[in-house]
Image (tube, rainbow, N blue to C red):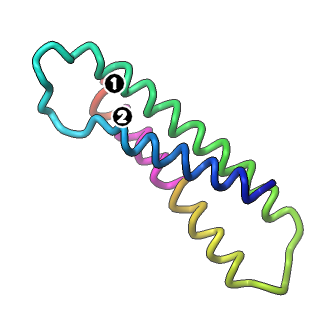
Amino acid sequence: MGWLLLLAAFMTWIIGLMMSPHGTTVADGTEHVRKVVVDFMRNSAIGTLVLSALSAWLLFGTRRPKWPARDWAILAVLVFLVGSSLYTLVWLYLSVLR
C-alpha cells in the first residue's frame, strides 16, 4: 500500500508541475484562469505532502535491514517530492498570492 501511495504522490506532483503558472506572459482574456491554476497548484502541493507522509509512514513502519539501498532510494524520492512541494507553496505565496 505504501508503494501505491508513493506512486499517487508522484502523479499528484507531476500533474501540479504541468499546470505551473511560471512566467509573466498572459494571453489577452485569460487573466481569470490564473487564480484557478494557482489554487490547483496549491492543492496539488498539499496533496503531495499528505500522500508522501502516508507512504513514508507505511514504507518505513518497520526497519528492514535487508536492502538499505532501497530505503535510501525511497527516502531520496520522498525528500525530493516534499522539498519541491514546499518550494511550490513558498513560491506561490511570495510571487502570486501576495
Q: Residue 91 lies in magenta, yes or no?
A: yes
Which numbered marker is on residue 92? 2
Q: Secondary structure at mark 1?
A: loop
Picture coordinates of residue 18, whole percent (x, y): 37, 43
Quarter of the figure that contains the C terminus: top left
Q: State the residue position of label 1.
A: 97
Closer to the camera in the image, 61 or 10: 10
The residue drawn where x is 55% and y is 48% is: 11
Q: How many marks?
A: 2
Q: Is residue 49 left or right of residue 57?
A: left
- Say if 92 sits above or below 10 in the image: above
Residue segment shown in magenta = 82-93
Picture coordinates of residue 21, whole percent (x, y): 28, 35
CA separation in Å, label 1 and label 2: 6 Å
Q: Is residue 28 left or right of residue 21?
A: left
Q: Residue furthest right?
A: 62
Q: Is residue 41 left or right of residue 1?
A: left
Q: Is residue 92 left or right of residue 61?
A: left
Quarter of the figure that contains the N terminus: bottom right
Tell me if mark 2 has few (under 14), some (14-19) or many (20+) residues whose alpha carbon lies within 10 angstroms of its own: some
Callout 2 amino acid: Leu
The residue drawn where x is 77% and y is 56% is: 2
- Say if 28 sits above or below 67 in the image: above
Q: Are marks 1 and 2 in contact (CB under 8 Å)?
A: yes
Closer to the N terminus: mark 1 or mark 2?
A: 2
Callout 1 amino acid: Leu
The residue drawn where x is 20% and y is 17% is: 30
